Image (spheres, grey):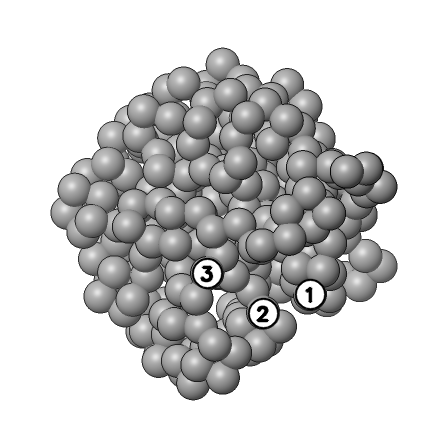
Amino acid sequence: MPITAPFKLASREFRDEPTVIAVNGTKIGGKQLPVIAGPCAVESTEQIVTIARLVQKAGASFIRGGAFKPRTGPYSFQGYGEEALKMLKAAKDETGLGIVTEVMTPHEVELVGEYTDMFQLGTRNMTNFYLLREVGRAGKPVILKRGMSATIEEWLLAAEYILAEGNPDVILCERGIRTFETHTRNTLDLNAVPVIHELSHLPIVVDPSHGTGIRSLVCDMTKASVAAGADGLLLEVHHDPDHSMTGDGAQSLFPDQFETLMRELQPIAIAVGREI
C-alpha cells in the first residue's frame, strides 16, 4: 500500500490504531493519563528521593530528572552524569516510579539505558540524527521533544529516524516553540495535540513547564493539555525551587501545588475518557 506521507512509519496511513506503549507497568497512549514529574536536574540523592516520594504520593507514574544537562551556556550546571543516574535508581527503588532522563550523545545511550526506563531527547537534539538512530537501536521507549523551532512535519520525520531503526516505542512531547512572544519562555502549541492524533498513531504528551516557563501558568496549561487530548504530562516539581541548581525554579511547581493539580485534573480526565 503506498503511503503518501513523508513520515512513513509514523503515519496513520501505516497504522490506523493508536500505539500504546507499556513502561514500568504504565500504558502511554491508551486510557491511562500518566504523569511524569520531578526536578529539572538531579542535585542529590536526598533531593531526588524526597521529590519522588512526594510526586508518587500525589499520583505520578514516573520520576524525571536530568543527569546530563544540555545548557545554553558552557558555564552553567551540566549535571552529575552517572552519579545522578545512580541517584535516580535509588529514587526508583524507594518508590517504584519509572525513570525518565535525558540522553545527549550517541556514546552515552548504553550507559543511560542501564538505568532509565525511557530515554528523553531534548529540544536541542531533535535533529541530532546520529543520536536518533542510536536510541532507535537501543530498544527502549523514547520521549522525543519537539525542536524549539520545528514544524510538526519535521518533528514527525525526526521520530521516523527512531522508528526506521526498529524501535516502535516513540512518544512525542510538545514542549513549546519559539515565537515572537517574549512574555512566556515558549509558546505552548496545543494545536499539536489534535494534529498529531490526526496525522500519526504515536502518543503525544505535553510539557507545560517548559511551554510556559512561569509557575503561575503551568496548572492552567496542564488542564488545557488534558482537555486537548494529551496522552500524558511532563511537569517540573521541586521542593525548593528557589535554590534549584539549573535556574529553572521559576517554572517548577511546589509539591503542594502538584498535589492540588492532580486532584483538579481528575474531572477533566474523566470528561475526555482518561484515567489518572
In the rendered structure, which disc, 2 or 3, sits on the residue that comes first in sequence? Answer: 3
Where residue 164 sits in the image (x, y, percent)?
Answer: 63, 26
Where residue 86 sits in the image (x, y, percent)?
Answer: 25, 30
Pick the residue in front: 38 or 246: 38
Q: Which residue is mark 2?
A: 229
Q: Is residue 134 above or below residue 263?
A: above
In the rendered structure, which disc, 1 or 3, sits on the residue that comes first in sequence? Answer: 3
Where residue 95 sits in the image (x, y, percent)?
Answer: 18, 51
What residue type is disc 1 on? Pro
Q: Is residue 9 above or below residue 236?
A: above
Q: Which mark is residue 30?
A: 3
Estimate how packed mark 3 is, as few (under 14), some (14 to 19) or many (20 or more) residues with alpha carbons within 10 Å: some
**At x 49% / y 14%, what residue is drawn?**
107
Whether pointer 2 and pointer 1 mark residues with C-beta atoms closer than 8 Å, the reply is yes
Query: Among all residues in the image, which is located at the extreme top?
Result: 107
Estimate how packed mark 1 is, as few (under 14), some (14 to 19) or many (20 or more) residues with alpha carbons within 10 Å: some
Where residue 101 sits in the image (x, y, percent)?
Answer: 42, 38
Residue 37 left/right relative to 71: left
Query: Among all residues in the image, which is located at the extreme left?
Result: 94
Q: Which mark is residue 194?
A: 1
Pick the residue in front: 121 or 42: 121
Quarter placement of the C terminus: bottom left
The Cα atoms of the two marked residues, 1 and 3, are separated by 15 Å
| Visible residue check, residue 257 | no
Q: Secondary structure at mark 2?
A: loop
Quarter placement of the N terminus: top right
